Image (cartoon, grey):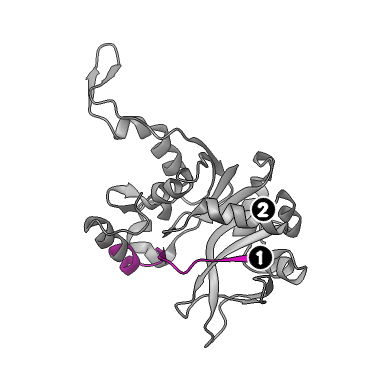
Amino acid sequence: MKAVILAGGYGTRLSEETDLVPKPLVEIGGRPILWHVMKLYAAANITDFVICAGYKASMIKHYFASYFLEINDIEIRTATREINYLTPKSLDDWTVKIIDTGLDTMTGGRIKRVAPYLDGTFCLTYGDGVADLDIAKVIEFHRSHGRLATVTTVPSPGRFGILDMGSNDAVLRFHEKPDAEMGWINGGFFVLEPSVVDYIEADETIWERQPLERLAADGQLMAYRHSGFWKAMDTLRDRRDLEELWANGSAPWRL
């Protein structure tokens, strides 16, 4: 199974960092937030990634291209251009496709652009959010209900979109960022069938609007409730909070 990661946005609310690097490469504990997200999937034995890049896509490509180089001490022989790794550390056994899905493409459009690289049920998430979530259990839940889409939901902090859910956890309605409402929100970890791409029209389609709203209306969107730790790195304050948790050795998502 593949994990698709949306990593192409401008990250304007974190401009203190994203003027220099794309948001997924902003570091927590010396590692990009993107790496932390990928570790969550690797814990569920999902190691085949499709990264939907856009803003500063070349920097994400360079990070993975030089991944082994960065984590080891090295000796370089300039005359022969030979590089010896002095402290060879074991690497994560990942396959990483980095696809430039366009600078201004919306989230739905990015998913549609990478559809040729998908060959079955797949996971989808954002490159800036972590949780103490058991991805394997979300996949098991998805397979149990037979619908096209599963969204992991988390308790609303009061500033995100709301999902109306029935007694059997079927999503009855999905509505984004309403005023003065509380409830369960899109936690950003999805399990999807390939045909959800048919709900996406073009580059301008925002995944969190028409596609999810239509899937809910068609009875094809189910919710996996997660009441544990969850945090999206939207602002500099969010980054500092995550950094503090990691530095203190108390990061709930740490594996």
Identified at 24% across, 56% down, the residue is: 249
Q: Tell me the quadrant of the picture where the N terminus can be found.
A: top right
Q: Residue 114: in sight, yes or no?
A: yes
The segment highlighted magenta reads 222-240
Of the pair 167 and 187, the residue shown nearer to us: 167
Residue 153 locus on image (x, y percent): 54, 68
In the rendered view, would you say 162 is above or below 70? below
Q: Amino acid at mark 1?
A: Met
**Left or right for 235, reference 177:** left
In the rendered view, would you say 1 is above or below 187? above
Q: Could you say which disc has been placed on residue 222 in the image?
A: 1
Identified at 28% across, 11% down, the residue is: 80
- Under circle 2, the secondary element is helix
In the rendered view, would you say 234 is above or below 159? above
Identified at 59% across, 52% down, the residue is: 139
Q: Residue 104: in sight, yes or no?
A: no
- Under circle 1, the secondary element is strand
Residue placed furthest toward the top: 80
Residue 133 locus on image (x, y percent): 46, 58
Q: Tell me the distance, in whole angstroms, between the alpha carbons under discs 2 and 1.
A: 11 Å
Q: Could you say which disc has been placed on residue 143 in the image?
A: 2
Q: Could you say which disc has been placed on residue 147 in the image?
A: none
Specify whether residue 231 is painted magenta: yes
Identified at 31% across, 69% down, the residue is: 237
Residue 14 locus on image (x, y percent): 38, 64
Which callout, 2 or 1, points at the residue further toward the start of the chain?
A: 2
Specify whether residue 237 is painted magenta: yes
